[in-house]
Image (cartoon, rainbow, N blue to C red):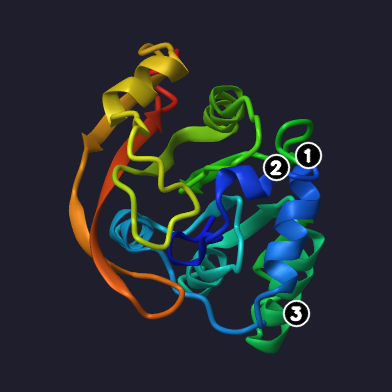
Amino acid sequence: MDATHRPSTTADDATTDGRAEDFWERHHRSRRPGAARVNPLLVETAAPLDPGAALDLGCGAGGDTLWLARQGWSVTAVDISATAVERIRERARDLGLADRVTAERHDLASSFPAGRFDLVSAQYFHTPFPLTRDRVLRTAARALRPGGFLLIVDHGSTAPWSWNQDSDTHYPTPAEVAADLALDPAHWSVVRADMPRREATGPAGRTATVTDNVLLVQAAGPEESK
């Protein structure tokens, strides 16, 4: 889910109809199609890597998907919103990237895309609805090819435009996220776990300093996994 395109709705407002797909459909239908920004921590992580197969979980407006495709990655873009998925397909066609982008609608609470990936990106993979996030991310880790990376970037602070303005919100640290995933260290290793700060720009152009919680996990290579 794009960091700079989070809905401004409160969590209470979001749950009035009790259906995540309806909420995210309304969110994406209310936004004009157009260029979306890539998340900077994805650029920082993926730029040094050789392009391969990537999975963009909760792809939203598609800024990450399209950036990866421009760099030569074959990208599977996944979102619960059919509108978001169709717009990414259209944008990829317009940019001549259709051969590198596969967009699929999935409610990750109940289904997960097939395939093996060199990079799985979960950018601000938050929702105001119940979701067994740890299970989804463990499934993502198991979908990595040997030597592949799972990049999890979470909110570490509340931006002024966030739909969640609860001052008591606890943002799990990267160490807490890693502990909750409980991945076997014989098969996955943590290669980055930190909390960098950056200047972010919100939907209306408002800026603020925010903290990101970053966890980067690598699957064991073929020799290590023997």
The residue under the point 61% across, 29% down is 136
Q: Is residue 13 left or right of residue 200?
A: right
Amino acid at the residue labelled 2: Thr
Residue at the outermost bottom position: 94
The residue under the point 50% across, 64% down is 64
- Image height check: is 178 above or below 80? above
Q: Secondary structure at mark 3?
A: helix
Q: Is residue 178 left or right of residue 8?
A: left
Q: Secondary structure at mark 1?
A: loop
Which of 92 and 137 lies nearest the eye of the viewer? 137
In the rendered image, the quadrant that contains the C terminus is top left
Q: Position of residue 225 (x, y in %)?
A: 44, 17
Residue corresponding to mark 1: 18
Q: CA distance from mark 1 to mark 2?
A: 5 Å
Q: Position of residue 94 (x, y in %)?
A: 69, 88
The residue under the point 43% across, 79% down is 204
In the rendered image, the quadrant that contains the N terminus is bottom right
Please tell me the numbered disc located at residue 117. none
Q: Which of labels 2 and 3 is toward the front?
A: 2
Residue corresponding to mark 3: 90
Q: Is residue 192 left or right of residue 129?
A: left
